[in-house]
Image (cartoon, helix red, strand yellow):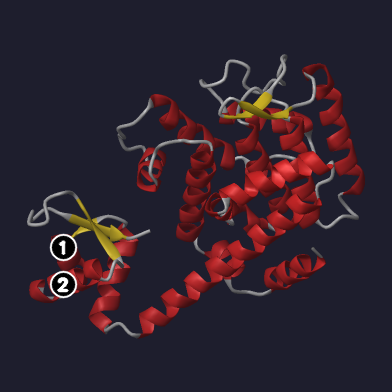
Amino acid sequence: MLNYVSDIMKKVGEANYFESLNRYSESRRKTRIKSIYSSLAIENNQLSLFQVEDVINGKPVMGEQKDIQEVKNAYEAYEQIDKVNPYSVDDLKKIHGILTFLIEKDAGKFRNHGEAVYDGDIQIFMAPPHRLVPSLMDNLFNWMNKVKDTINPLILSSIFHYEFVFIHPFSDGNGRTARLWQTAILSNWEKAFTYLPIESMIKKNQEEYYTAIQNCNNSGESTEFIEFMLKMIDNTIDEMNNSKEMKAKSMLLLSENEIKVLECIKKNVIISAKEIIEQTKIADRTVRRILKKFVEGKTIEMIGDNEKSPSKKFKIKE
């Protein structure tokens, strides 16, 4: 556990990924979208990453209204991370109210009934009785306020995550709230954590995530889950750093015209070949050759079903 903490602390002190997130709003937006998509997908939201992005950008999306509303709610809730006090139970209730707006009738209110988790027809977890929830949550937040200056936020936020899921204080949205609130605690310590997509790494290791929770429930202590979350945070930083380094290396292999085309697409987000030609002043034939190379290399993707359409557009591939 301590090895993970020291490793993460060292990386936080380095200027690579965290500096890039602090400086570039485009990077922040993309990682925010990844966080929202992954956290909702863990809870069986059926929208794709691109559909989530379209919802956030205000574009019409075909899908279940509940799934679409969850994305809108999550985006609004994540936008509040810098404005909440992560050691306030009242602020947590407000965030839950945003996350479950128009979805859960008791949004922002603790449950008033028993709650259990099932695997098919088999009950695998029974949450504490609802009458104990207010006092359990008060105890949790009182403890956090007492130790927040003595326990490393990496460990503190992981303990909170597990204890919150165990208490299961709301009728719905507990997992989403737990993951967002861990980010809130971490970002209160180091701002760049606001945009670190830890949720994406959890989604990739979803089975291990639930296994760690269940094992801790069975053992009555949270060490396994803390170690799991520290590993997820460490792996997420590594993945983001490696992605940044790979992109930097690949840029060195591009011609001057290829770099111009790529930067033009990044700037405009979605753009047609004709618009690229007009903005870069590169010859039509050259631009189309470069676009073909980037599509085949999966650097960019074509928007639309008709490959031969003169109005087809391109965007950077996620």
* Image position, residue 311 (x, y; %): 11, 53
Q: Which residue is mark 2?
A: 287
* Image position, residue 110 (x, y; %): 72, 21
Residue 93's tag is: none
Residue drawn at 56 percent across, 29 percent down: 120
In this rendering, the answer to whether 10 lies above or below 197 is below
Q: Amino acid at mark 2?
A: Val
- Dots 2, 1 in contact, CB < 8 A: yes
- Front-lying residue, 211 or 179: 211
Which element carries disc 1, helix, strand or loop?
helix
Tell me which corner region of the image, top left, top right, bottom left or bottom right, holds residue 63.
Answer: top left
Q: CA distance from mark 2 to mark 1?
A: 7 Å
Crowding near pointer 1: few (<14 within 10 Å), some, many (20+)?
Answer: some
Residue 273's tag is: 1
Residue drawn at 46 percent across, 55 percent down: 30
Classify residue 146 as left or right of residue 105. Answer: right
In this rendering, the answer to whether 70 lies above or below 188 is above
Classify residue 148 as left or right of residue 265. Answer: right
- Front-lying residue, 276 or 230: 230
Q: Amino acid at mark 1?
A: Ala
Residue 153 in sight here: no
* Image position, residue 208 (x, y; %): 62, 51
